Amino acid sequence: MKLKSTTKNTPYLLERIFKIKRIKNTIDLSNSFTVVNGEASSALFDAEIYKVTFRTESRREIKSYTLFLSGNELICDQEIDALKECLGITLTGDGSQFEILDYQTDFTIQFDQENSSFVESDGVEKGLIIFKK
């Protein structure tokens, strides 16, 4: 039996460029953009869905919760409630800017690393943000 392998052609090359700014407990992605076939667009970034993973470690137990966000939509109440119940983190906002209102323990936020690049800024390294209680 002979196996055939095929290469899937992608119609375009896409990369998200995260420009993440942390000001106290507010995370601002409003200057982020998407590059498609060499052309930059902030509107495309707003329409893209990206992954944000919150992670805590307490008494050697690691817990994480992942949100899938887009820049132009509010974070829904069910996701806010689930994040609070699972990790003790309360937030509000949307995919382009959200604020951490309360948290019970140290935690990290890791932004989507697939097809993504990051512009380094104070308190943000390779899409990782650390919150200390």
Image (tube, helix red, strand yellow):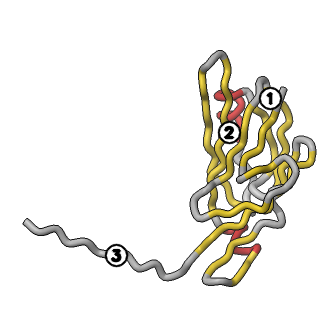
Give the distance between the C-alpha atoms of the residues marked 3 and 1, in whole angstroms. 46 Å
Q: Earlier in the sequence, mark 3 or mark 1?
A: 3
**Residue on which the image places disc 1:** 103
The residue depicted at 84 percent of the width and 26 percent of the height is 133
Q: Which residue is mark 2?
A: 54
Q: Are marks 3 and 1 in contact (CB under 8 Å)?
A: no
Residue 67 lies left or right of residue 93; in this view the side is left
Left or right of 15, for residue 41: right
Q: Earlier in the sequence, mark 3 or mark 2?
A: 3
Alpha carbon distance from label 1 to label 2: 11 Å
Q: CA distance from mark 3 to mark 2?
A: 34 Å
Residue count near mark 1 (Cα–Cα under 10 Å), binned few <14, some 14–19, many ≥20: some
Q: Nearer the viewer, residue 19 or 67?
A: 19
Relative to residue 132, is residue 37 depicted above or below?
below
**Residue shown at the point (63%, 57%) measured from the top left:** 50
Secondary structure of the residue carrying tag 3 is: loop
Q: Say which residue label 3 marks.
A: 7
Q: Amino acid at mark 3?
A: Thr
On screen, residue 2 above or below 94: below
Which amino acid, mark 1?
Answer: Tyr
Residue 43, horizontal then vertical, whole percent: 74, 74
Residue 2 is tagged as: none
Mark 3, Cα crowd under 10 Å, few <14 / some 14-19 / many 20+, is few
User: Looking at the image, which is closer to me, 98 or 114?
Assistant: 114
Please give left or right for residue 109 compared with residue 24 in the image: left
Label 1 secondary element: strand
Tell me where residue 94 appears, x and y as whole percent. Answer: 77, 53
x, y (%) of residue 64? 61, 34
Q: Callout 2: few (<14), some (14-19), or many (20+) C-alpha neighbours within 10 Å?
A: many
Helix, strand or loop for disc 2 = strand
